[in-house]
Amino acid sequence: MPRLRASLTIGAHFVVDVFSFVPIALMPMLAFLLDIAPEQKALLFGIGAFASGAVQPVVAWVSDKLDTRALGTLGMIVAVLAIGHLGMAQNFTQLMVLYAIGVAGVGAYHPPAAAAVGALAGKHRARWIALFFLFGMIGGIVGNKFTPAFVETLGRAPDGSIDLRNGLMDLRLTIPVGLAVAGVLAWAVHGVGKRENGRPPVDTHWEPHERRLRWRAVILLYFSNMIRFGVNMSLIYLFTEWAVEQTLISNGASVLTEELSAESSRLNGNLQAAMQVGMGGGGIVLGFILAARFEKLVFFVLPVLGSLAILAITLADDVAPGLVVPAAALGSVLSGLGFGAVIPVSISLAQRMLPHRVSLASGLMLGGAWCFSFVGPLVVETAQNGLAGKRSAPGWLLEWGEGLPAWLGRPLMDGMGLDAGFVVAAGALFLAGLITLGLPRELMHETHRD
């Protein structure tokens, strides 16, 4: 029952990504309760990205080597247990450990699951991978949109006051649901392997020139995805900060309270969900309608459009001050389209380039690229706030910054504000598009026909 198994695996992706975005949506609440500084938030997002990404190539290699998908199910179980207990964190270190373990479990799920869907889909690989990607994005939307409301509702006392700690502790109510879905996933994917599915072995007797072209394509896709994921993590951090800043401005306040932190989490969740809409909506459309002759063009054009949308967010205050929040939401959708819509296309293309190593191809395009996205939040946070006053900045780096010419050293030390972070993210996304201009067009057409 290949289509049923593929559908259940895709459904599990929805649940996994609901859990993966729970800590992101709740970050303003968590930062308020645990007194987390901006640079610690950037570090937290960075460590999470590295943990999620670094585990994926390892899991992919082991899955291919042992011809098993069981590590994906194990990863989902770990994710559900760790993220479901986030409310138990009493300080930044405990939160960091729980978050890193949870997102590592999320990362471990993805390569075996994506490979299983690709193997089960056969000739319709691109469409089913796009569906796999879409349901992950929908899960992200649900996690971002409803988690703050879930926590706020359960933390609301009869007298109308709010106790965020109690609401966060009730995240444990989601654990049984997640474990039940992991059981369904185990049935769906554990029999899907190269040897069990009866397919003939892949012919890899390529000419040296073709072999080099295939690996060059995978390497270019890898670096482009690495930058795109870095932009993704950068925007996750930037929208979190933007939501807090906008909440303070709209309420005429200078510091957060429990009520305002809950409000900023709702706004942050909406912006993060909007980003998922752009990623998922664009991904499913491309998966179903994109012709081979336009693949290379789309890899370049969408990141360029996304970079322009990110830049537009910085102009909203001046151009349309009364529509700042809707403008940010629209920019979030378009930025998600710019960096995320081509991700499923890159997975499908990498699997076509390395048909004998589909888990490895999936792992490289997902986790292998994702693990370096931790640089994104750290870079844009430095552009925003600078190095001065950072508790985590090494002394030699501060001395180096102070020794630079004033026109360069002062912005580096003191920061240039939140808009600077958005500008850096936009420039990085434009670079991701430029890299893909080196993809081998003819080989992309040929493998698409295969």
Image (cartoon, rainbow, N blue to C red):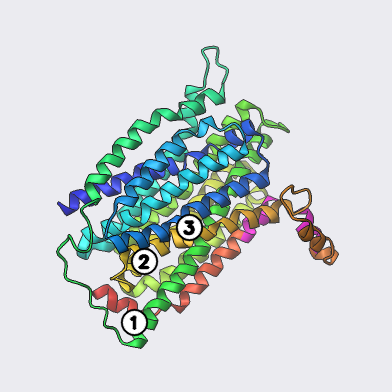
**How would you classify the magenta stretch by its main secondary structure?**
helix
Q: CA distance from mark 3 to mark 2?
A: 14 Å
Callout 2 secondary element: helix
1 vs 3, front mark:
3
Region of the chain picked out in magenta, as a range: 409-424
Task: Using the rendered view, name the quadrant where residue 431 is placed.
Answer: bottom right
Marks 1 and 3: CB-CB under 8 Å?
A: no
Residue with the mark numbered 1: 442
Q: CA distance from mark 1 to mark 3?
A: 32 Å
Comparing 386 with 374, the one in front is 374
Q: Nearer the viewer, residue 26 or 314?
A: 26
Q: Residue at x 64, y 59 (%)?
A: 423
Q: Secondary structure at mark 3?
A: helix
- Where is residue 185? Give x, y as percent: 27, 45
**Depicted 101 relative to depicted 220: above or below:** above
First-in-chain label (2 vs 1): 2
Residue 64 in the figure: left or right of residue 414: left
Do the numbered discs 3 and 2 sit on residues whose CB atoms are within 8 Å? Answer: no
Q: Is residue 440 magenta?
A: no
Q: What is the three-letter code of the residue carrying label 3?
A: Ala
Marks 2/1 in contact by CB < 8 Å: the verdict is no
* 410 in the magenta segment: yes
In the image, residue 107 sits, relative to residue 262, either above or below, namely below
Q: Amino acid at mark 1?
A: Glu
Residue closest to the far top: 159
**Label 3: which residue?**
54
Q: Which residue is mark 2?
A: 361
> Sequence-wise, which precedes: disc 1 or disc 3?
3
What kind of element bears circle 1? Answer: helix
